[in-house]
Image (tube, grey):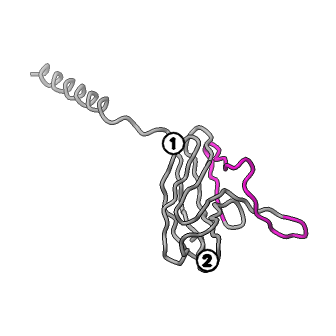
């Protein structure tokens, strides 16, 4: 009888190990996440708008935001704010036309910094509206996100 209990225990352990080995493989060590996507409300008469977000790179390799597409604008460009002469802020396309997202780091696109410039708004950008946006990354590929129109990041 003692051998029967040992055999049952060994078979039970073998079954558990077999089940664990055939279970779904674990997810990749990390991925790129896009968080808190939003756009500031603006008057209908305003020709342009902006979108902001956090890009969180949980992967082990650098990535880069290459392109943004949305039907809310005629064109979307990656821009940054910078200080001009006499403490006047200016805006220009980001250097190289892309935003690098280093491995293990977070890059924030925010008011007064880097952002997605929406040139030639085709949508109202009214409080409570939301618009689909396609982000194109060098490694992560295309990601679909939704930007909520509001007063601030919170």
Of tags 1 and 2, the one toward the viewer is: 2
Q: Nearer the viewer, residue 59 or 2?
A: 59
Question: Residue placed farthest to the top in the image?
Answer: 3
- Residue that label 2 marks: 42
- Residue that label 1 marks: 30
| Structural distance between the alpha carbons of marks 1 and 2 | 36 Å
Residue 85 magenta-highlighted? yes
Q: Nearer the viewer, residue 37 or 24?
A: 37
Q: Nearer the viewer, residue 109 or 14?
A: 109
Residue 121 falls in image quadrant: bottom right
Left or right of 125, for residue 1: left
Left or right of 148, for residue 20: left
Q: Earlier in the sequence, mark 1 or mark 2?
A: 1
Percent coordinates x, y for residue 72 in the rendering: 54, 66
Percent coordinates x, y for residue 83 in the rendering: 83, 64
Q: Is residue 117 above or below residue 1?
A: below
**Circle 1 residues within 10 Å: few <14, some 14–19, many ≥20:** few
Q: Quadrant for the C terminus, please.
A: bottom right
Q: Is residue 84 above or below residue 30?
A: below
Q: Which residues are magenta?
A: 84-110
Residue 149 falls in image quadrant: bottom right
Which numbered dot is residue 124? none
Q: Quadrant for the N terminus, please.
A: top left
């Amino acid at each position: 009888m003692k051998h029967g209990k040992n055999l049952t225990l060994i078979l039970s352990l073998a079954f558990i190990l077999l089940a664990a080995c055939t279970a779904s493989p674990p997810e990749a060590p990390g991925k790129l996440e896009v968080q808190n996507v939003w756009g500031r409300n603006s008057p209908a008469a305003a020709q342009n708008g902006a979108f902001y977000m956090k890009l969180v790179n949980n992967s082990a390799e650098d990535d880069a935001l290459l392109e943004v597409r949305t039907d809310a604008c005629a064109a979307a460009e990656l821009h940054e704010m910078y200080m001009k002469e006499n403490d006047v802020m200016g805006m220009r396309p980001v250097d190289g036309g892309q935003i690098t997202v280093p491995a293990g780091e977070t890059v924030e696109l925010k008011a007064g910094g880097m952002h997605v410039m929406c040139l030639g708004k085709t949508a109202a950008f009214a409080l409570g509206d939301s618009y689909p946006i396609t982000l194109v990354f060098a490694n992560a590929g295309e990601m679909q996100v939704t930007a909520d129109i509001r007063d601030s990041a919170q």
